[in-house]
C-alpha cells in the first residue's frame, strides 16, 4: 500500500522542512534563503502508519534562463505527473499571493488529489492566512507547522482516505474497509462516526505510574501491555487497534511524560516526545490522573498541550478504588479542574479504576461524546441568529467612541470547531470579548470539552479578491465558507 506524494508550492513556504520531517532524515537542505533546494528529491516517508514516497520540489529561484513562472510551472507539472497526491503548501503568515493562485490553477486542472496545507501555522500570526486559504477553492486547508511538527494529525486525516483508495485500486484490501469520503452533506445534527477503516484515535496520556497501561489492558480485556509498580516502565508509544463497544478504536499508550528537566537518558527523552507525538495523532486525548496526586504541574502541561493541539479532551481520574471520602474528593477535583484548566471548561471528568474496571463504560461514553462535539458543525443561519442575540446582550466595546461592528459569522472548520467573525476592527477586539463569544458558543451550542477557535477578520484584511472582481456578498460568503463548509 504505497503511493507518491509531491510537495509543491512557491519558494520558501517550508516544503523541505516538511519533507525532512516526513522522511525523518536531513535529506533536503533547509535554509531561510529562498531556493536552497536544488532539485526534486525523493524519500521514503512515514506518517503514523502510512508509508509513502515523498517528493520535494524546490529550487525555483536558481535558474536564470527562464521566468520564475515558467520554471515553477514546469517543475510543478513534472512533480504532479509523477505523484498520486499533491500537497500544495502556502505560507499562512503571508496569506495567499498571486503566485499561490497560479499554483492552485495548475493543480486544479492537472492533479486528481490535492491537499492544501497552510504552513508556518503556529501562533495567531497565521490565523488570517489559514482562513484566507479557503479562497483557493481547494477545500479545507490543513494548518501545519512543519518546523514545530504541528498539524500532522490533520494531514494524516486527509491522507488516510486517499491512501486507502490507492490501496483499494491496487486491490489488495478487503471490501469491508470502504472509506466514507462524503463530508459535504453533514448538517449540524449529524456528526461523523468513525468508519471501519478509520478508527477513532485515542491517546492515553499522563504522568508516569498514573495507570495508563493498566487502563488499556482492562479495555483490551487481556494483558497485552506490560504494567508494573515502577514509574516509567512503558518506553514507547504503542498503538493497538480494538473494537471498543462496537467502535473501531486505535489507542496509543504513551510513556509517562515527565518534566523535561527531569528527563535524563536519551531513551527517556524519546519517550517524552513519543507522548507528544501521540497527542498530535490523536483525535481524543484522555488525560489520566492519579487520584492520589491529581493536577500536578505536569498533568496541567499535558492537558494544556492537548488543548493547544486542538484535540478533544477527556480527563479521567484513576485509582478511584482506593479513595475514601469520594464525594468530597470529587467536589475538590471539579473545583481544581475549573480553576486550573479554564481553557478546558466543561470537559468531562470521569472517575475510574483501571484495576477493577469501574467507570470504564462511562469513560467510553464520554470519549464518544467528546468526539461528537469535536466534529460538530453549526449552520451559518443559526450562528448569525445567535450572534445578533449576543451583541444585543453585551455590545462590543467602543474604543475612542467608535463602536466595533461584528457583521457576520460562519463556521470555517471542524475538528475542532473553528469560527470566523467578520468585523470592522479585528485588532481592537479585546480578549475578554472573544472569550465572551467562545463561552457563549460552548454553552448555547452545547460544545463542552473541545477547543473552540475564533478568528476575528476585517473585511479588508488581505482579501485575495480585492482588485479583481467586485466582491459581492455571495462571493464574500463563498470566500468565508470555503468549498467544504456547510
Ligand atoms: N515559522 C515557521 N517557519 C518555517 C516553518 N516551516 C519552515 N519554516 C522556515 O521557512 C524557511 C524555508 O523553509 P524550506 O523548507 O527551506 O522552504 P522550501 O519551500 O523548501 O523553500 P525552497 O527550497 O526555496 O523552495 C526556513 O527558514 C524554515 O525554517 C514553520 O512551520 N514555521
Ligand atoms: N489501586 C489501583 N492501582 C492502580 C490502578 N491502575 C493502575 N494501578 C497501579 O499503578 C501502577 C502503575 O500502573 P501502570 O499501568 O504501569 O502505569 P503507567 O501510567 O502505564 O506507567 P508508566 O509506564 O510509568 O508511564 C501499577 O502498580 C498498577 O497496578 C487502579 O485503578 N487502582
Image: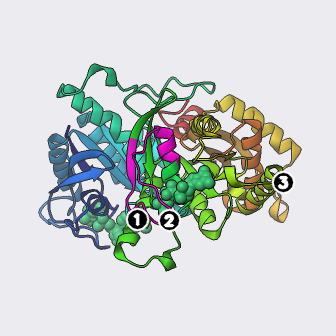
* Numbered mark located on residue 257 in the image: 2
Q: In this view, does 299 lie to the left or right of 10?
A: right
**Residue range corresponding to the magenta coloring:** 215-240
CB under 8 Å between discs 2 and 1: yes
Residue on which disc 1 sits: 271
Regarding residue 402, the answer to whether it shows in the image is yes
* Prevailing secondary structure class for the magenta stretch in the rendered image: loop
Residue 339 image position (x, y, % from top left): 77, 61
Q: Earlier in the sequence, mark 2 or mark 1?
A: 2
The secondary element bearing badge 2 is classed as loop
* Numbered mark located on residue 151 in the image: none
Q: Which of marks 3 and 1 is nearer the N terminus?
A: 1
- For residue 202, above or below residue 427: above
Disc 3 to disc 2, C-alpha distance: 29 Å
The quadrant in which the N terminus is found is: top left
Regarding residue 460, the answer to whether it shows in the image is no
The residue drawn where x is 73% and y is 57% is 337
Splitting the image into four quadrants, where does ligand 1 fall? bottom left
Q: In which quarter of the image is residue 199?
A: top left
Amino acid at each position: 500500500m504505497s503511493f507518491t506524494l509531491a510537495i509543491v508550492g512557491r519558494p520558501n513556504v517550508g516544503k523541505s522542512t516538511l519533507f525532512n520531517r516526513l522522511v525523518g532524515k536531513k535529506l533536503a537542505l533547509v535554509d531561510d534563503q529562498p531556493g536552497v533546494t536544488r532539485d526534486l528529491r525523493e524519500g521514503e516517508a512515514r506518517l503514523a502508519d502510512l508509508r509513502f514516497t515523498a517528493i520535494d520540489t524546490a529550487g525555483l529561484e536558481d535558474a536564470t534562463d527562464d521566468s520564475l513562472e515558467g520554471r515553477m510551472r514546469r517543475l510543478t507539472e513534472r512533480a504532479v505527473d509523477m505523484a498520486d497526491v499533491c500537497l500544495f503548501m502556502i505560507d499562512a503568515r503571508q496569506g495567499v499571493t498571486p503566485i499561490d493562485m497560479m499554483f492552485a490553477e495548475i493543480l486544479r486542472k492537472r492533479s486528481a488529489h490535492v491537499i492544501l496545507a497552510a504552513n508556518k501555522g503556529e501562533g495567531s500570526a497565521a490565523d488570517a492566512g489559514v482562513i484566507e486559504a479557503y479562497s483557493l477553492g481547494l477545500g479545507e486547508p490543513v494548518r501545519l507547522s512543519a518546523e514545530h511538527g504541528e498539524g500532522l494529525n490533520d494531514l494524516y486525516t486527509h491522507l488516510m482516505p486517499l491512501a486507502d483508495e490507492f490501496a483499494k485500486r491496487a486491490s489488495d484490501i478487503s471490501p469491508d474497509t470502504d472509506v466514507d469520503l462524503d463530508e459535504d452533506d453533514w448538517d449540524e445534527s449529524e456528526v461523523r462516526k468513525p468508519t471501519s477503516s478509520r478508527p477513532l484515535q485515542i491517546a492515553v496520556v499522563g504522568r508516569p505510574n498514573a495507570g495508563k497501561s493498566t487502563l488499556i489492558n482492562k479495555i483490551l480485556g487481556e494483558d497485552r501491555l506490560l504494567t508494573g509498580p515502577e514509574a516509567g516502565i512503558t518506553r514507547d508509544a504503542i498503538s493497538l487497534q480494538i473494537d471498543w463497544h462496537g467502535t473501531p478504536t486505535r489507542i496509543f499508550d504513551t510513556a509517562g511524560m515527565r518534566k523535561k528537566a527531569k528527563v535524563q537518558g536519551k531513551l527517556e527523552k524519546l519517550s517524552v516526545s513519543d507522548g507528544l507525538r501521540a497527542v498530535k495523532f490523536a483525535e481524543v486525548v484522555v488525560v489520566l490522573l492519579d487520584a492520589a496526586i491529581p493536577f500536578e504541574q505536569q498533568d496541567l502541561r499535558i492537558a494544556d498541550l492537548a488543548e493547544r493541539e486542538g484535540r478533544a479532551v477527556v480527563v479521567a481520574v484513576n485509582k478511584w478504588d482506593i479513595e475514601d471520602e469520594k464525594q468530597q474528593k470529587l467536589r475538590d477535583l471539579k473545583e481544581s479542574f475549573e480553576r486550573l484548566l479554564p481553557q478546558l471548561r466543561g470537559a468531562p471528568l470521569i472517575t475510574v479504576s483501571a484495576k477493577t474496571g469501574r467507570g470504564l463504560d462511562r469513560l467510553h461514553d464520554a470519549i464518544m461524546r467528546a468526539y461528537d462535539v469535536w466534529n460538530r458543525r453549526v449552520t451559518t443561519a443559526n450562528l448569525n441568529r445567535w450572534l445578533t442575540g449576543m451583541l444585543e446582550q453585551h455590545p462590543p466595546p467602543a474604543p475612542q467612541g467608535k463602536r466595533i461592528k461584528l457583521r457576520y459569522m460562519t463556521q470555517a472548520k471542524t475538528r475542532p470547531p473553528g469560527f470566523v467573525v467578520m468585523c470592522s476592527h479585528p485588532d481592537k477586539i479585546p480578549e475578554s470579548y472573544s472569550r465572551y463569544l467562545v463561552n457563549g458558543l460552548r454553552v448555547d451550542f452545547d460544545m463542552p470539552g473541545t477547543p473552540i477557535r475564533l478568528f476575528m477578520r476585517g473585511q479588508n484584511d488581505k482579501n485575495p479578491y480585492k482588485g479583481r472582481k467586485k466582491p459581492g456578498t455571495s462571493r464574500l460568503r463563498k470566500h468565508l465558507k470555503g468549498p467544504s463548509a456547510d
